[in-house]
């Protein structure tokens, strides 16, 4: 093999490898530039815009918002700290059953119109297996006043 042929084969191989490397390098650079434009720059501008502002949002997220009702019992429910001592089991003290609520509404708002009423057909006493007696109210279909 002559030295001229060897240099021609080697230069062709070197050119091919260099071209492939250069194309891969350009392609990778373009991918990173696109990623920079569409991923990094929008988040960077968020930091620039919020620069110098107080971070109250982070403080609000990290504060304690609820705690256990009973600290000794880990299975006790969590309650909001703002209303921890104000929780009620009844809407009002004089309300014993749900049947009292319509009467209370009529006393408080006698001049307001209703959307409709139901006539009470019958009230039955229903005895449960455990001995409790419930009043079962049979109602007529709803009639509208329009």
Image (cartoon, grey):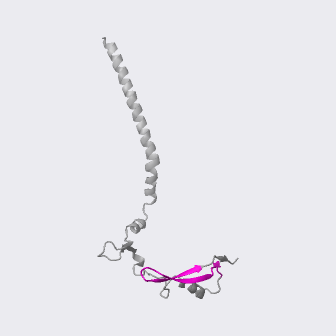
Residue at x 40%, y 66% (from the top left corner)? 61
100 over 82 or under it: above or below:
below
Q: Which residues are magenta?
A: 113-138
Q: Which residue extends farthest left?
A: 72
State yes or no: residue 44 in magenta: no
Pick whichever, 109 or 60, lies toward us: 109
User: Magenta stretch: residue 114 in it?
Assistant: yes
Q: Measured along the vertical axis of the image, is residue 65 above or below residue 87?
A: above
- For the point 56% across and 84% down, the residue is 123
Position of residue 117 in the picture relative to residue 17 (left or right): right
- The residue at the point 37 percent across, 67 percent down is 62
Q: Nearer the viewer, residue 135 or 98?
A: 135
Q: Residue 134: percent from the left, percent from the top? A: 49, 82
Among the 4 quarters of the image, the one containing residue 65: bottom left
Left or right of 100, for residue 79? left
Q: Is residue 54 visible?
A: no
| Rendering coords of residue 53 (x, y %) | 43, 64
Q: How many marks?
A: 0
Rendering quarter of residue 112: bottom right
The image shows residue 124 at horizontal and vertical percentages of 54, 83
Instruction: Please identify the quadrant where the C terminus is shown.
Output: bottom right
Q: Where's the N terminus, which quadrant?
A: top left
**Front in this rendered view, residue 110 or 117:** 117
Q: Position of residue 89 (x, y in %)?
A: 44, 81
Corner quadrant of residue 120: bottom right
Residue, far right:
146
Residue 80 located left or right of residue 143: left
Res. 112 in view: yes
Q: Main secondary structure of the magenta part?
A: strand
Q: Is residue 48 above or below residue 54?
A: above
Give whichever of 67, 39 is nearer the camera.
67
């Amino acid at each position: 093999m002559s030295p001229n042929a060897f240099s021609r084969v080697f230069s062709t191989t070197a050119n091919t490898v260099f071209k492939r490397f250069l194309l891969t390098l350009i392609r990778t650079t373009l991918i990173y530039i696109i990623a920079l434009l569409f991923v990094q720059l929008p988040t960077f501008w968020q930091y620039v815009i919020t620069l110098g502002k107080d971070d109250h949002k982070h403080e609000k997220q990290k504060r304690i918002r609820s705690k256990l009702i009973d600290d000794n019992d880990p299975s006790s429910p969590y309650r909001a700290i703002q209303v921890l001592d104000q929780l009620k089991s009844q809407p009002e003290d004089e309300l014993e059953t749900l049947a009292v609520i319509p009467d209370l509404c009529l006393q408080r708002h006698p001049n307001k119109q209703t959307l409709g009423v139901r006539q009470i057909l019958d009230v039955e006493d229903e005895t449960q297996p455990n001995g409790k007696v419930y009043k079962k109210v049979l109602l007529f279909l709803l009639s509208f006043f329009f």
